[in-house]
Amino acid sequence: MNLTINGVSEDLTPKRPWRYLLILVLLIALALLAYFTGVFGLLGRNQDDEESLPAIRVEVSNGCGIEKLAADYSVYIRDKNIDVLRVSSTPYPIYNKSVLVLINGDEQDLRRLQRMTGIQRYTLARNPESDVQFTIILGEDFKDYMKD
């Protein structure tokens, strides 16, 4: 319906606010999708992505005193994107829980290593001169992280 006053025509049909609401909802959904895929990489990430990333350099350390544990664990993780530079034993076999020691890595590599090993506990021991990014200290719970 049109109204003409002094030669100026004005449209009196009601506006459809639901269109604007629909457009707003779609824009918010697209923004959230872009945020989660771009920033976090949560959607669309698979194991092939891990292979395209550089290997994480680690030292595997026996923290519970079981003979050859660090060497055996190094063999166990050889198919993961983890480069074991050396194996060792802690001075005292007192660890009942396994732990990741972040030395030169960053939080993104820490999350990758946690995902690959299953070990969630971590601590910081920064050393810019070390050739490894992390030390994996195996505790008495090592069997939880060596499942086939």
Image (spheres, rainbow, N blue to C red):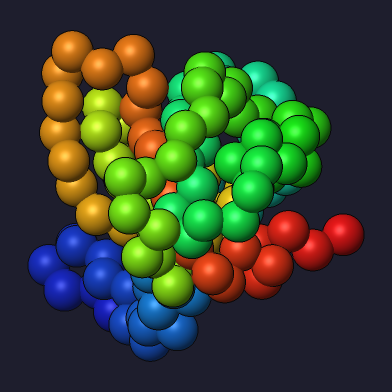
- Is 71 left or right of 136, judged from the image as shown? right
Instruction: Please provide percent x and percent y for residue 46.
Output: 72, 44
Q: Is residue 38 left or right of residue 48?
A: left
Q: Residue furthest right?
A: 148
x and y percentages locating residue 142 in the rendered image? 61, 63
Q: Confirm whether residue 113 shows in the render.
A: yes
Asked where in the image residue 55 lies, by quadrant, the reply is top right
Foreground: 45 or 62?
Answer: 62
Q: Quadrant of residue 133?
A: top left
Q: Residue at x 73, y 59 (%)?
A: 146
Along the line of sight, which residue is nearer the eye, 21 or 100? 100
What residue appears at the point 44 percent right and 41 percent down from the top-left corner? 89
Residue at x 31% of width, y 31% of height: 105
Q: Residue at x 57, y 71 (%)?
A: 141
| Position of residue 66 measured from the top left corner of the image (x, y, whole percent) | 60, 56
Counting labels gives 0
Front one among 69 and 148: 69
137 shown above or below 144: above
* Residue 98 can be seen, yes or no: no
User: On the rendered structure, is 107 left or right of 118?
Assistant: left
Quarter in which the N terminus is drawn: bottom left
Quarter occupied by the C terminus: bottom right
Q: Quadrant of residue 122?
A: bottom left
- Looking at the picture, tell me which residue is in the foreground, 24 or 60: 60
Residue 29 drawn above or below residue 90:
below
Give the image location of residue 77, x and y in percent: 71, 39
